[in-house]
Image (cartoon, rainbow, N blue to C red):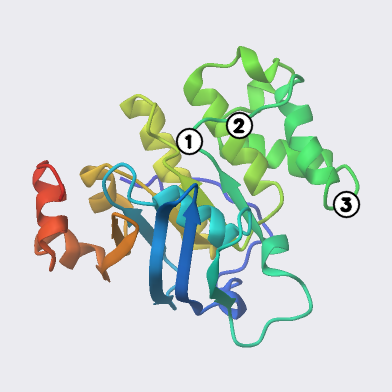
Amino acid sequence: MLDRNMPVLDDIATGRCIDLLPLRVSGLSLTRNNEVLLRDINFEIDNAGITLIMGPNGAGKSILMRLLHGLDKPDSGLIEWGDKLSNQQPSQRQAMVFQKPVLLRRSAASNIDFAIRLNGPTNPKLCNDVLNIVGLSGMAKRPARSLSGGEQQRLALARALAVKPDILFLDEPTANLDPASTKIIEDIVLAQKQAGTKIIFVTHHIGQAQRIGDDVLFLNRGRLTEQSPAKAFLEKPNSQAARDYLAGNMVL
């Protein structure tokens, strides 16, 4: 269950991502080394909740997320954010946390400060606030790479939150974590959702999808085979591939 007292940054306003939505993706395709990774992906997201990207290994989930975040470019297709955007680029209002945390060889606090300084002057209060949000306020001076796996992932999440993203991409952030660390991450994500952040979250875990998901994009072999509310998808998916996936069977 979500800890209703989970802190968030005090200047976040509900609905702040609204001008970035809807997200419209049309005809998105990508081929690398003669292998088709994504083929003609089309969807629209207009809700400010948690969108899950699910599918078997090799389906193209992480690639799709990287394209949405602007880390890679498609061979063809369009990614359009919002109808009334200002001159600010969507990527400037986004952050991403990878499955394996990438941390600098410096203290936990210095990792946060590095992200803050990319967008403006150093801000000790903001640094302390995000460390508090992820439960690492007592480890600010510890070398980041000396933290446990779960603590490192929380630090990576804190670093993402430090830039106050309107869109937060999470690529299997709990894949290698124990249940306690997984719950902490989920509680933070749910609190950020309530504070107005749009979350796009790759996961393989059915239980996690039940706990946090609002809607699901299901990929298989580089194609989007299903888009539906999370509850409907988990209870009665439309495609045979999704039914096999949820049953733990091999997906063809």
Residue type at tag 3: Gly
Say whether disc 1 or disc 2 marks the residue closer to the N-terminus.
Answer: 1
Q: Is residue 5 visible?
A: no
Which mark is on residue 120?
3
Q: Quadrant of the N terminus?
A: top left
Relative image position of residue 50 (x, y in whole percent): 40, 61
C-alpha distance separating marks 3 and 1: 27 Å
- At mark 1, the secondary structure is loop
Left or right? Give the position of 58 relative to 82.
Answer: left
Residue 219 vertical position relative to residue 121 in the rendered view, above or below: below
Relative image position of residue 27 (x, y in whole percent): 45, 76
- At mark 3, the secondary structure is loop
Q: Are marks 1 and 2 in contact (CB under 8 Å)?
A: no
Near mark 3 (Cα within 10 A), the count class, few <14, some 14-19 or many ≥20, is few
Residue 15 vertical position relative to residue 173 in the rendered view, above or below: below
Residue type at tag 1: Gln
Residue type at tag 2: Leu
C-alpha distance separating marks 1 and 2: 13 Å
Say whether disc 3 or disc 2 marks the residue closer to the N-terminus.
Answer: 3
Q: Nearer the viewer, mark 1 or mark 2?
A: 1
Near mark 2 (Cα within 10 A), the count class, few <14, some 14-19 or many ≥20, is many
> Which residue position is annotated with label 2?
155
Relative image position of residue 127 (x, y in whole percent): 75, 38
Q: Is residue 141 visible?
A: yes
Left or right? Give the position of 89 relative to 213.
Answer: right
**Residue under the image location 22 percent in, 44 percent down:** 207
Q: Are marks 3 and 2 in contact (CB under 8 Å)?
A: no
- At mark 2, the secondary structure is helix
**Residue under the image location 21 percent in, 46 percent down:** 206
Foreground residue, 60 or 18?
60
Left or right? Give the position of 97 relative to 205.
Answer: right
> Which residue position is annotated with label 1?
99
